[in-house]
Image (cartoon, grey):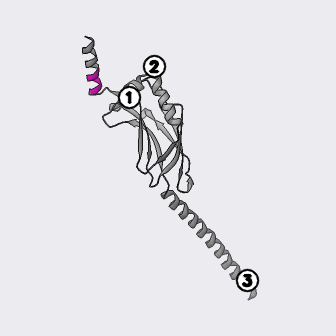
Amino acid sequence: MDRLSLAFASAALLVSIVTTVVGYKQLSLSRRVRREQLEPYVIVDISPRAPESQMLCLSVENLGPTVARNVRLQIEPPLRSTLDSEREEILRRVVGRTIPSMPPGRKIIYNMDLGHKYFAADPPLPLVYRATVNADGPFGAVETMTYEMDLDVWPETAIHSETVVGQLKEIAKKLRKG
């Protein structure tokens, strides 16, 4: 009888230990989820400025519910542009600068290039960029986020063609010359 009691007691102890471990893991996961829900969520993207726009833009946006502080970007390879070397230098400075704070919903947009020029560049410009974002939130450093920005999805869209505004500017330029 003592052996049977000891076996039941051992089984009960084992069940208690397993229950405690599972409960601790659930509590840890719950705390992590709650913390992540309260952290900033900064994304980086390259896309047209507006649906009808030719301008490709680099955007940095905080989609989270709290302020992102000390936002730091790294983009590989370095951003390129056909507009001029000054535009590439501006983009390098933008990426190399720390953004002191980004409130929830803040979106910063930087002009990068014109779609039809970017995709027609000779030699070709990079079509894939990898962005890494580091920031601080209310609980300290936020998990590092890495995004792959694949521009190869854009050439078949309207961004690859000239806009009416661009065509009017060309006509106006030709009229001034002549």
**50 over 3 or under it: above or below:** above
Seen as rendered, the residue at the extreme front is: 100
The residue where tag 3 is placed is: 6
Residue 135 position within the rendered picture, expressed as x and y whole percent measured from the top left? 53, 47
Q: Mark on residue 46? A: none
The residue where tag 2 is placed is: 122
Residue 161 position within the rendered picture, expressed as x and y whole percent measured from the top left? 32, 27
Q: Mark on residue 115? A: 1
Q: Residue at x 67, y 75 (%)?
A: 14
- Which of 37/157 is in front? 37
Q: Is residue 155 visible?
A: yes
Q: Which numbered disc, 2 or 3, marks the residue that appears first in the sequence?
A: 3
- Which of 130/140 is in front? 140
Seen as rendered, the residue at the extreme bottom is: 1
Within 10 Å of disc 2 (Cα), the crowding (few <14, some 14-19, many 20+) is few
Q: Which numbered disc, 3 or 1, marks the residue that appears first in the sequence?
A: 3
Residue 132 position within the rendered picture, expressed as x and y whole percent measured from the top left? 54, 41
Classified by dominant secondary structure, the portion drawn in magenta counts as: helix
Query: Is-magenta flag for residue 167?
Result: yes
Q: Amino acid at mark 1?
A: Gly
Q: Amino acid at mark 3?
A: Leu
C-alpha span from label 3 to label 1:
76 Å
Q: Residue at x 48, y 58 (%)?
A: 37
If the image is split into quadrants, where does the C terminus sit? top left
* Mark 3 vs mark 1: in front: 1
Q: Residue at x 69, y 82 (%)?
A: 9
Q: Quadrant of residue 54?
A: top left
Residue segment shown in magenta: 165-169
Q: Amino acid at mark 2?
A: Asp
Q: Quadrant of residue 168?
A: top left
Circles 3 and 1: CB atoms closer than 8 Å: no
C-alpha span from label 2 to label 1:
14 Å
